[in-house]
Image (cartoon, rainbow, N blue to C red):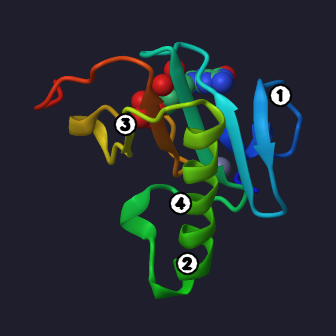
């Protein structure tokens, strides 16, 4: 666990979150400032600073995370589609330096994003 990392502390249940799915290595919880009616963050419990840090060794973890996201999309009835996005670095607006996928849905999502 990284010192002073917000999402490490949420993963350790030191800080409350609206958790909707939990596994040994993965946690999914609702974003505190939702940008769509469904806005879930999916994180590895292990501290990884961003998607830029991923290597082949994370293959199984990533497959599990995408499996969790597919299952959440079904549970949240996002049959019309949804978006999965991860921000990397300041130009993309990454504000928490712990890998997280945003799962967004429940409204029409514009493209290109802002
Ligand atoms: P980023 O800007 O790094 O791509 O995404 C970080 C996300 O974390 C933002 O959408 C923000 O609303 C969310 N967030 C920040 N602090 C908290 C928190 O304490 N709890 C929850 N559930 N979400 C948070
Ligand atoms: Zn962390």
Mark 1 beta carbon near ligand 1 (under 8 Å)? yes
**What kind of element bears circle 1?**
loop
**Label 2 environment density (alpha carbons within 10 Å; few <14, some 14–19, many ≥20):** few
Check contact, mark 1 vs mark 3: CB within 8 A.
Answer: no
Q: CA distance from mark 1 to mark 2?
A: 26 Å
Establish if 51 lies above or below 88: below
> x%, y% of residue 94?
38, 37
**Label 1 environment density (alpha carbons within 10 Å; few <14, some 14–19, many ≥20):** few
Q: Earlier in the sequence, mark 2 or mark 3?
A: 2
In this view, the mark in front (3 or 4): 3
Kindly identify the residue that appears in the image at 38 percent across and 46 percent down.
Answer: 86
Q: Which residue is mark 4?
A: 66
Q: Which residue is mark 1?
A: 15
Q: Which residue is mark 3?
A: 81
Q: Earlier in the sequence, mark 2 or mark 4?
A: 2
Decide which of 30, 107 is in the foreground and name it: 107
**Label 4 environment density (alpha carbons within 10 Å; few <14, some 14–19, many ≥20):** some
Check contact, mark 3 vs mark 4: CB within 8 A.
Answer: no
Q: Earlier in the sequence, mark 1 or mark 2?
A: 1
Q: CA distance from mark 3 to mark 4?
A: 15 Å
């Amino acid at each position: 666990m990284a010192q002073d990392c917000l999402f490490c502390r949420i993963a350790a249940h030191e800080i409350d979150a609206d958790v909707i799915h939990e596994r040994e290595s993965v946690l999914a919880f609702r974003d505190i400032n939702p940008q769509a009616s469904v806005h879930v963050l999916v994180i590895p419990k292990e501290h990884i600073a961003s998607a830029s840090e991923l290597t082949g060794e994370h293959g199984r973890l990533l497959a599990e995370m995408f499996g969790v996201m597919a299952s959440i999309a079904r549970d949240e009835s996002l049959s019309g589609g949804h978006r999965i996005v991860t921000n990397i670095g300041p130009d993309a607006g990454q504000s928490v330096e712990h890998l997280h996928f945003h799962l967004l849905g429940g409204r029409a999502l514009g493209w290109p994003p802002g």
